[in-house]
Protein backbone atom coordinates (compact mmCIF):
# COMPACT_ATOMS: atom_id res chain seq x y z
CA UNK A 1 0.00 0.00 0.00
CA UNK A 2 2.80 2.39 0.93
CA UNK A 3 4.53 1.70 -2.39
CA UNK A 4 1.30 2.50 -4.28
CA UNK A 5 0.95 5.79 -2.41
CA UNK A 6 4.57 6.66 -3.20
CA UNK A 7 4.19 5.63 -6.87
CA UNK A 8 1.13 7.86 -7.16
CA UNK A 9 3.23 10.76 -5.86
CA UNK A 10 0.93 11.30 -2.88
CA UNK A 11 3.63 10.82 -0.24
CA UNK A 12 7.27 9.93 0.06
CA UNK A 13 9.05 7.67 2.50
CA UNK A 14 5.89 5.72 3.32
CA UNK A 15 7.36 2.29 2.69
CA UNK A 16 10.32 2.95 5.00
CA UNK A 17 7.96 4.29 7.68
CA UNK A 18 5.78 1.17 7.46
CA UNK A 19 8.83 -1.10 7.70
CA UNK A 20 10.07 0.80 10.75
CA UNK A 21 6.59 0.65 12.29
CA UNK A 22 6.40 -3.09 11.65
CA UNK A 23 9.81 -3.54 13.31
CA UNK A 24 8.68 -1.53 16.33
CA UNK A 25 5.42 -3.44 16.74
CA UNK A 26 7.18 -6.80 16.33
CA UNK A 27 9.55 -5.90 19.17
CA UNK A 28 6.70 -5.27 21.64
CA UNK A 29 6.79 -8.48 23.64
CA UNK A 30 5.21 -7.28 26.88
CA UNK A 31 1.87 -6.01 25.53
CA UNK A 32 -0.14 -9.08 26.43
CA UNK A 33 1.05 -9.17 30.04
CA UNK A 34 0.53 -5.40 30.41
CA UNK A 35 -2.96 -5.76 28.94
CA UNK A 36 -3.81 -8.52 31.38
CA UNK A 37 -3.03 -6.26 34.35
CA UNK A 38 -4.99 -3.36 32.87
CA UNK A 39 -7.94 -5.63 32.08
CA UNK A 40 -8.02 -6.93 35.67
CA UNK A 41 -8.15 -3.38 37.00
CA UNK A 42 -10.95 -2.46 34.55
CA UNK A 43 -13.22 -5.39 35.46
CA UNK A 44 -16.54 -4.07 36.77
CA UNK A 45 -15.52 -0.50 35.92
CA UNK A 46 -16.50 2.01 33.23
CA UNK A 47 -13.30 3.17 31.52
CA UNK A 48 -13.06 6.75 30.30
CA UNK A 49 -10.04 7.08 28.04
CA UNK A 50 -8.32 10.46 27.91
CA UNK A 51 -5.52 11.39 25.52
CA UNK A 52 -3.67 14.50 24.41
CA UNK A 53 -5.55 16.09 21.51
CA UNK A 54 -3.32 14.62 18.78
CA UNK A 55 -4.04 11.10 20.07
CA UNK A 56 -7.68 11.59 21.08
CA UNK A 57 -9.48 10.53 17.90
CA UNK A 58 -6.90 8.16 16.40
CA UNK A 59 -6.23 6.33 19.67
CA UNK A 60 -8.68 7.08 22.50
CA UNK A 61 -11.79 6.90 20.32
CA UNK A 62 -10.70 3.69 18.58
CA UNK A 63 -9.66 2.11 21.91
CA UNK A 64 -13.13 2.97 23.26
CA UNK A 65 -14.73 1.27 20.25
CA UNK A 66 -12.56 -1.83 20.76
CA UNK A 67 -13.73 -2.10 24.39
CA UNK A 68 -17.38 -1.45 23.47
CA UNK A 69 -17.44 -4.04 20.70
CA UNK A 70 -15.07 -6.72 21.94
CA UNK A 71 -15.67 -6.52 25.69
CA UNK A 72 -19.36 -5.54 25.50
CA UNK A 73 -18.60 -2.87 28.13
CA UNK A 74 -19.55 0.78 28.36
CA UNK A 75 -16.52 2.95 27.68
CA UNK A 76 -16.06 6.61 26.81
CA UNK A 77 -13.28 8.89 25.56
CA UNK A 78 -12.27 12.53 25.51
CA UNK A 79 -9.32 14.78 24.83
CA UNK A 80 -7.01 16.54 27.24
CA UNK A 81 -7.07 19.53 27.81
CA UNK A 82 -10.79 19.69 26.91
CA UNK A 83 -11.72 17.27 29.70
CA UNK A 84 -10.13 19.62 32.23
CA UNK A 85 -13.02 22.03 31.80
CA UNK A 86 -16.61 20.84 32.12
CA UNK A 87 -15.95 17.10 32.21
CA UNK A 88 -13.62 17.36 35.20
CA UNK A 89 -16.47 18.92 37.19
CA UNK A 90 -18.46 15.72 36.55
CA UNK A 91 -16.08 13.85 38.84
CA UNK A 92 -17.09 16.07 41.77
CA UNK A 93 -19.91 13.71 42.63
CA UNK A 94 -19.14 10.16 41.52
CA UNK A 95 -22.24 8.45 40.17
CA UNK A 96 -20.69 5.35 38.65
CA UNK A 97 -17.70 3.04 38.85
CA UNK A 98 -15.54 5.09 36.48
CA UNK A 99 -11.84 4.57 35.88
CA UNK A 100 -9.90 7.32 34.14
CA UNK A 101 -7.46 5.85 31.62
CA UNK A 102 -4.90 8.55 30.84
CA UNK A 103 -2.66 8.15 27.80
CA UNK A 104 0.59 9.99 28.36
CA UNK A 105 3.14 10.94 25.70
CA UNK A 106 6.58 11.22 27.35
CA UNK A 107 7.79 13.21 24.33
CA UNK A 108 4.85 15.59 24.38
CA UNK A 109 4.95 19.21 25.37
CA UNK A 110 6.04 19.69 29.00
CA UNK A 111 2.83 21.58 29.79
CA UNK A 112 0.75 18.62 28.49
CA UNK A 113 2.81 16.17 30.56
CA UNK A 114 2.22 18.40 33.61
CA UNK A 115 -1.52 18.56 32.79
CA UNK A 116 -1.80 14.76 32.54
CA UNK A 117 0.10 14.25 35.83
CA UNK A 118 -1.95 16.90 37.62
CA UNK A 119 -5.21 15.49 36.26
CA UNK A 120 -4.24 12.00 37.45
CA UNK A 121 -3.37 13.28 40.93
CA UNK A 122 -6.56 15.35 41.21
CA UNK A 123 -8.80 12.46 40.13
CA UNK A 124 -7.02 10.05 42.49
CA UNK A 125 -7.50 12.48 45.40
CA UNK A 126 -11.22 12.52 44.57
CA UNK A 127 -11.47 8.72 44.72
CA UNK A 128 -11.39 8.02 40.98
CA UNK A 129 -9.19 5.07 40.02
CA UNK A 130 -6.62 6.16 37.43
CA UNK A 131 -4.83 3.95 34.93
CA UNK A 132 -1.89 5.73 33.27
CA UNK A 133 -0.60 4.32 30.03
CA UNK A 134 2.63 5.69 28.61
CA UNK A 135 2.64 5.88 24.84
CA UNK A 136 5.81 4.26 23.54
CA UNK A 137 7.53 4.42 20.21
CA UNK A 138 9.98 6.50 18.19
CA UNK A 139 7.28 8.34 16.18
CA UNK A 140 3.70 9.50 16.77
CA UNK A 141 2.51 6.74 14.42
CA UNK A 142 4.41 4.08 16.37
CA UNK A 143 2.96 5.40 19.63
CA UNK A 144 -0.56 5.33 18.22
CA UNK A 145 -0.30 1.81 16.79
CA UNK A 146 1.42 0.48 19.94
CA UNK A 147 -1.44 1.82 22.06
CA UNK A 148 -4.07 0.39 19.72
CA UNK A 149 -2.30 -2.96 19.75
CA UNK A 150 -2.31 -2.84 23.56
CA UNK A 151 -6.05 -2.09 23.58
CA UNK A 152 -6.66 -5.06 21.28
CA UNK A 153 -5.33 -7.23 24.10
CA UNK A 154 -7.10 -5.22 26.82
CA UNK A 155 -10.45 -5.59 25.05
CA UNK A 156 -9.82 -9.31 24.55
CA UNK A 157 -8.86 -9.81 28.21
CA UNK A 158 -11.92 -7.94 29.52
CA UNK A 159 -14.30 -10.01 27.41
CA UNK A 160 -16.69 -11.95 29.60
CA UNK A 161 -19.29 -12.76 26.94
CA UNK A 162 -19.18 -14.65 23.69
CA UNK A 163 -17.89 -12.50 20.82
CA UNK A 164 -21.01 -12.62 18.67
CA UNK A 165 -23.35 -10.00 17.32
CA UNK A 166 -24.97 -8.31 20.28
CA UNK A 167 -28.67 -9.02 20.82
CA UNK A 168 -28.93 -5.42 22.01
CA UNK A 169 -27.73 -4.18 18.60
CA UNK A 170 -30.09 -6.58 16.87
CA UNK A 171 -33.07 -5.20 18.82
CA UNK A 172 -31.99 -1.64 18.08
CA UNK A 173 -31.67 -2.39 14.36
CA UNK A 174 -35.14 -3.91 14.39
CA UNK A 175 -36.65 -0.90 16.14
CA UNK A 176 -34.95 1.57 13.81
CA UNK A 177 -35.94 -0.32 10.69
CA UNK A 178 -38.87 1.02 8.70
CA UNK A 179 -39.40 -2.46 7.23
CA UNK A 180 -40.18 -4.49 10.37
CA UNK A 181 -41.27 -7.62 8.47
CA UNK A 182 -37.93 -7.93 6.68
CA UNK A 183 -36.06 -7.10 9.85
CA UNK A 184 -38.01 -9.73 11.82
CA UNK A 185 -37.04 -12.37 9.24
CA UNK A 186 -33.40 -11.32 9.44
CA UNK A 187 -33.40 -11.36 13.25
CA UNK A 188 -35.07 -14.78 13.25
CA UNK A 189 -32.36 -16.13 10.92
CA UNK A 190 -29.61 -14.65 13.11
CA UNK A 191 -30.98 -15.91 16.41
CA UNK A 192 -32.77 -19.16 15.54
CA UNK A 193 -30.87 -22.35 16.33
CA UNK A 194 -29.65 -24.30 13.34
CA UNK A 195 -31.53 -27.50 12.61
CA UNK A 196 -29.42 -30.21 11.06
Image (spheres, rainbow, N blue to C red):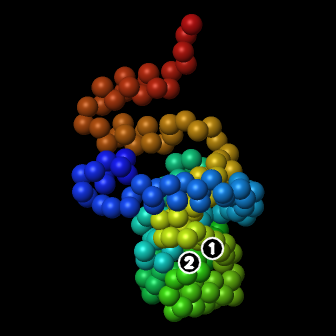
- The foreground one among 50 and 125 is 50
Q: Give the image location of residue 153, x and y in percent.
A: 64, 52
Q: Give the image location of residue 86, x and y in percent.
A: 44, 84
Q: Residues within 10 Å of mark 2 (few under 14, many from 20)?
A: many
Please tell me which residue is depicted at 33% across the width and 61% down the height of the picture: 12
Residue 164 marker: none
- The foreground one among 11 and 126 is 11
Please tell me which residue is depicted at 66% across the width and 72% down the height of the picture: 131
Contact? badges 1 and 2 (CB < 8 Å): yes
Residue 92 in the image: above or below residue 160: below
- The residue under label 2 is 105
**Quadrant of the image containing the C terminus:** top right
- The residue under label 1 is 134
Give the quadrant of residue 93.
bottom right
Judged left or right of residue 183, residue 127 is right
Say which element carries label 1.
strand
Amino acid sequence: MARLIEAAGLATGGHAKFEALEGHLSALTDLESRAEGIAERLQGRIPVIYAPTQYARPVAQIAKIKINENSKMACFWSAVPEMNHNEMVGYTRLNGPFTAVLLDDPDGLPRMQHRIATTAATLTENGVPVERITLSGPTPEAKAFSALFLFDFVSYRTTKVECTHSKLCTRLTYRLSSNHAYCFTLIHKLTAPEIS
